[in-house]
Amino acid sequence: MRNIRKIVVHCSATPATMDIGRDEIDRWHRERKFNGIGYHLVIRRNGRLERGRAMEKSGAHAKGYNSESVGVCLVGGTDSAGKAERNFTPRQYARLAEVLKGLQLVFPDAEVLGHRDLPGVAKACPCFDVKEWWKSKKEEA
Ligand SMILES: [Zn+2]
């Protein structure tokens, strides 16, 4: 297994009405000449978890940090005009909390953060403060 130091949360930058998942993202990433889907895990609008790239393999989701991170993608994150919008469903948040908890058991030293928290990232992805959210989730548990 790779040495995982970061768990990076992303969004698919699609509107709430688009019920897509691993297969669509895999196709889009192949069109961008990636070696298949760049994320390791995808959380659909209904909260279903889908596996993307094998965890043992480097992802293609966080420039400069791919070899040391796991990429988790929430489906959603923009309005119908493509503008950043925090529109994730309660089921997605619940699943994300579960997934992060599981990942932190396997990688106890890994830091949980959003794509936008990485140095040099100018995107809004995933459209909310993951660190703050995760902190409050853990306190609530
Ligand atoms: Zn991202």
Image (cartoon, rainbow, N blue to C red):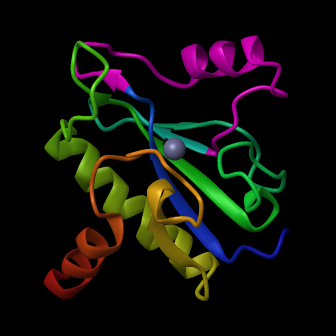
Query: Viewer-proximal residue, 52 or 78?
Result: 78
Q: Is residue 25 magenta?
A: yes
**Image coords of residue 41 (percent x, y):** 56, 44
Query: Viewer-proximal residue, 83 or 98?
Result: 83
Q: On the picture, is 70 further left or further right than 79?
A: right
Q: Is residue 64 above or below residue 27?
A: below
**Image coords of residue 17 (percent x, y):** 22, 13
Q: Quadrant of residue 44?
A: top left
Residue under the image location 48 percent in, 42 percent down: 73
Quadrant showing the N terminus: bottom right
Q: Is residue 68 above or below residue 89?
A: below
**Image coords of residue 62 (percent x, y):** 66, 52
Q: Is residue 58 above or below residue 14?
A: below
Q: Which residues are magenta?
A: 14-40
Q: Quadrant of residue 90?
A: top left
Residue under the image location 21 percent in, 35 percent down: 85
Q: Is residue 67 magenta?
A: no
Q: Is residue 128 above or below residue 4?
A: above
Residue under the image location 58 percent in, 21 percent down: 25
**Image coords of residue 7 (percent x, y):** 56, 66
Quadrant showing the C terminus: bottom left
